[in-house]
Amino acid sequence: MNNIIYICLIILSLVFLFYIRQKEFFQENNSDILLLLDSNRNIKAQFNNIKKYVKVYTPKPFNAVLFNGRNSSIIIPKINYNNLTVKLFFKIFELGPEINLLDSVSGDFSIKLINKKIVLVKGNKVIQNDRLIIADKMYFLAICFNNDKYKIHINGSETEEKIDKLNNTEEIILGTNNHSENYFMGTMGNIIVE
C-alpha cells in the first residue's frame, strides 16, 4: 500500500515540475514595454505588459505569449498593406460577451470574439464565422483580405464574403482595441503578418 502512495506522489511531483517548467519569463526588465527589433534595429513589435511566454507542443512546437486580460497587448507597426493576411494560434482562458483579438484603426477593421464566435467588423459591416469557440482550447486563426474579399479560417471552418476594399493598414494591435477595451486573456503564438 505504501509503495502505491509513493509512486503516486512521484508521478504527481513529475507532472507538477513539468507544468512549472512550461511557463517562462522574459529577461528581467523593469519596463512594461518590450521591443522586438529587426537586424537594422527597426521596431517589428511592441509588447505591452507581457511578462511571460509558454511553450506549446501541439500541433507543432512554438512559443506563445501570455496576455493577462487587464492591460497586455502587442502592437505591430509599419505594416503598410492593402492586401493582408494574419495567421496565429490562440487559446482563450476566459470567455466574455466581447473580447478583442485584433484591431487596426488605419485598416478600419477588427477581429473580435462575440458570444463565442469570431467576428470581423469592417466599418459598418459585421461578418461572423460559425465555429463555436470554447475556453482552454488551441485554435488556428487566419484572416485574409484580398481586394474586396475577406476570408476567415478557424480550425477548418471558413467564411468568405465580399466587403469594402481594405484601407491601407499601417499597424495592428493584438489583444485589445485602440481604446484599450475588452482585453484578451490567454495565449497567442506563431503570429505571421504578410
Image: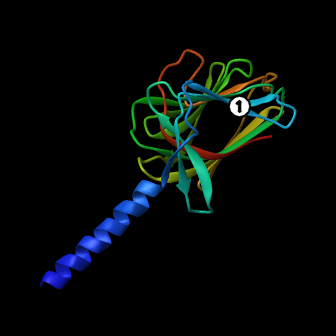
Instruction: Kindly state the secondary structure of the residue where label 1 is placed.
Output: strand
Image quarter (top left, top right, bottom left or bottom right) of the C terminus:
top right
Q: Quadrant of residue 86?
A: top right
- Tell me if 190 is positioned left or right of 80 in this view: left
Q: Which residue is mark 1?
A: 45
Image quarter (top left, top right, bottom left or bottom right) of the N terminus:
bottom left
Q: Could one spot residue 108 in this view of the protein?
A: yes
Q: How is the image coloured?
A: rainbow
Q: Which of the pair 36/156 is nearer the observer?
A: 36
Q: Which of the pair 149/95 is nearer the observer?
A: 95
- Tell me if 43 is positioned left or right of 15 in this view: right
Q: Could one spot residue 145 in this view of the protein?
A: no
Is 114 rendered above or below residue 189? above
Q: Which of the pair 162/113 is nearer the observer?
A: 113
Residue found 49% across the figure and 24% down from its top:
71
Q: Residues within 10 Å of mark 1 (few under 14, many from 20)?
A: some
